[in-house]
Amino acid sequence: MTPTANDHDAAPTLAEDSARVAEVVRRQYGLDGRVRALPGERDRNFRLVTEQGDGYVIKVHAPGADPAELDLQDAALLHLAGHPVPRLIPSLDGRRSVTVTWDDGPRIVRVLTWLAGRPWADVEPTEALLHDLGRQVAAIDAALSDFTHPAMGRDLVWNLTSAPRVAKLAALLDDDLMPLVTEVFDRYAEHVVPRLAALPHQVVHNDANELNILVDDDGGIAGLIDFGDLVWTPRVCGLGVALAYAMQGHADPLRAVLPLVRGYDEVAPLRTDELAVLFDLARTRLAMSLCMSAHQHANDPGNDYLLVSRNGVADVLRKLAGTSPDLAHFALRDAVGFAANPAARAVRRHFTSGEARPVSVLDEVHLGGRHGERTREGVRLGRDLRTDASVTVRCPLPAVVHAVRGDTVTLAHRTDDDVPFWTLYRGVTGPLRPGGVLAPGDPLGATNGKNLRLHLLTHLPDRVPDLVEAAEADLWTSVSIDPNLLLGHRGGGAARTGRDAAALAVRRRTNFSRALGLSYSEPLHIVRGEGAYLYDEADRPWLDMVNNVCHVGHCHPRVVEAVSRQVALLNTNTRYLHESVVAYAHRLVELLPDPLRVCFFVNSGSEANDLALRLASAHTGARDVLVLDHAYHGHLSSQVALSPYKFDGPGGQGGPTTTHVCELPDPYRGRLRAGRDDDLGPRYAAPVASHLATLKSRGLRPAAFFAESLQSCGGQIVYPDGYLRAAFEHVRQAGGVCVADEIQVGLGRVGRHFWGFETQDAVPDIVTLGKPLGNGHPLAAVVTTPEIARSFETGMEYFNTFGGNPVSAEAGLAVLDVIQDERLQANARARGDQLLAGLRRLRERHPLIGDVRGEGLFIGIELSLPGRAPATAQAAAVKEAVKARGVLISTDGPDANVLKIKPPLVLTEADCDLFLDVLADAMIQVEAHIQ
């Protein structure tokens, strides 16, 4: 272990001539301040603090230090500029280091910035801190992945690939440690060495020990110091080093560092071959540390610093002695989201493919507790087979008797691909002996009671538990898999093991893309919904003011009944005649203005807009499309290309040349403003005409103008009167098609009208519908004119496997029935008026509220600082403060400073009062921090 360059209370102090060092850095580096010595192994290290409070580390390297190796460190630090690592300070004449005369000969001096923070050894590591450490180590590795240097392949004893050389020092250890260390080195030679060459190699830090990791005052990783052990090696070796030292101080060292592995994998995904050796590499580092400290201390008995980590390292190695390397491998795979045991897939396939033809284990059986079932005691593994009396137990498959221990029999089997697996029977007595060969149907013995526990195993651990902790259920259910694969009882399959919120978040991070976000700083675990409320796992109600998908209320009984009824009868596609989809199409046409009467059914709003684009292009023969700034029309590639909200946002790469972005008609923060300018609608539409004129000058015509009827992601924008009507007129005169995206606002949400475009006294050529249509069921639609629909009839059939299926159609019909029967459009208008009035009263008392706007239950509350500057941070704080009081809202807009309100239409007067009271309290709380 290379010593740290930062000081800490537990480290010994070196007695050095600090005044001499101060003179060197004053003359060579122009730095003046107080100097004091730091601990070190071979180098002499000092800390300098200037009068201004700036800190530096002065490293006076031992005589004979290799300049190439020091240059390796310097080059790496320069390569890592911008990362939380020390910064190299050049001398006054620009050199990376200087050479000075010392008592024992010439020494190289280097100066680095001081990195503030407490050593890992001085803090109590939390799961979050371990996770952050993994991310930081991975970030350094990722940054170094393309770094090369002539000295990177140096012969370094601390390189984990030097383990065979270090193993020879095990004889210096105490008698209690020597067997532990020898077993680790033997395992390294047998299991790790053959795999090293195939692993990805790069330069790694290689020394993330408890003194080189710094923690900031907020409980996060402040940085990584001491790059003296930089080396070219398998990438995973650096992670193995970090694991070895992070394991110290934990009762269960392996489980404790799983968050670290997950954090690393989030930044630099681990390969399966790296995971296969990671546990052994961590143990090898521990063994090497013990051997090296014993060797160095034997050569320098007075330097107790060389033993600084010995006790902690030895304690970890002792605790790990009882850990199966195979189960550790499975735990590491599980931690990052792989199936724990990679062999389990082949064993399952052996049964599901029909290769295995098992005979019955028992002639008659009653199934007991289910495999994977969560109980108070833990998660159940295996299956209880219950009988009315003692009966014969039979071998289900060709087998060899592996073990007989008391009333437990273990049989070994193989798949057709020669993958081993085992069956274990607990509660059977008979004359079997290990090594015996059995055929299907051969007796194993008799049950010694009325209960037999059966396990189907993909790996044979020393102990097969019948119950495990929920935290380890995914691991163990990959080792002891569903016995019903063998038994074949209908309805006898494994139970779904439930997870708490924390476990769900962990599994989501490993098996979902991080591009898929969660709401709120502390995500909610929602388990049911009713009306305008969601309920978490503790059955706490949350008033949902943002979900415009469950349009008629969460889990509306009429929608649930309609879907349940139809799914029990038939679900097929539109290539067959069916009453439901035809009736649904006709209902939509009745609700839309002429000439919109031809329907296409799809599954999502993104699909609907994609199809609308195809229809427009087929009708016009053109490809250029006009859209509004900050618009969002879907996640398909074709729709991201029409969505400035995406292509001009974080991670976006700009729009294609065929997409023309028109000015957003924002009466609050836009170029033209309500109360100041006249004729906002037609004047905001003028840029549409300008874009069209530019296209015409290039000999082009527009395919379409896409616009949300009221813009949602742009900040709940209500267009000025006459905007869409004027814009549509410009587009049609240029030969384009007008598309109204009603996915966010349709079906009565705006209150005064059933469709958002009706608020603008405009009729589109194509209307797209989505979110609310199925009340949470995936249902969307495109409705257009007969002329445009005919243009799409080119000979290429349009078919959507699920679009227009009977179950979806019944969901859609039920939603329309509920809107009508429960007068939800009128309720949207009344509740919207109530909210808008209350919010405008709040605006008078809270200067942070810059604008209140909306139609019906589509409302935006824009938070602004002086000069209408966006109050982004305050909006986020209000969202969290409202959530803390049991109400759910969200933020949107190009600056994320608009509180968006779009609840289910079943919202009540009391719900609105509750929201207004909660928002008032939240505004007081947030504004107090501004002042």
Image: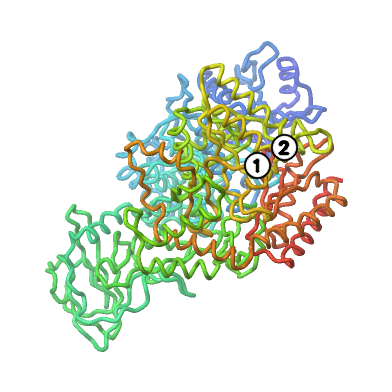
Image side of residue 309 versus residue 47, left or right:
left
* Residue type, mark 2 in image: Asp
Tell me, for residue 11, which label it has, or none.
Answer: 1
Determine which residue is flagged by label 2: 666
What residue is shown at x 42% (from left), y 66% (from top)?
496
Q: Earlier in the sequence, mark 1 or mark 2?
A: 1
36 or 225, which lies in front?
225
> Is residue 403 positioned above or below 50 on the image?
below
* Mark 1 crowdedness (10 Å alpha carbons): few <14, some 14-19, many ≥20: some
Image side of residue 197 versus residue 682, left or right:
left
731 or 870, which lies in front?
731
Name the residue at the front extreme: 594
Residue 135 rendering spot, x and y as whole percentages: 55, 42
Measured Cα–Cα span from mark 1 to mark 2: 62 Å
* Mark 2 crowdedness (10 Å alpha carbons): few <14, some 14-19, many ≥20: many
Residue 616 rendering spot, x and y as whole percentages: 48, 35
* Residue type, mark 1 in image: Ala
Image side of residue 598 versus residue 842, left or right:
left
What residue is shown at x 69% (from left), y 62% (from top)?
886
Task: Residue 479: tell me if it is visible.
Answer: yes
**Quadrant of res 567:** bottom left
Marks 1 and 2: which is nearer the front? 2
> Is residue 644 positioned above or below 876 on the image?
above
681 or 362, which lies in front?
681
**Quadrant of res 695:** top right
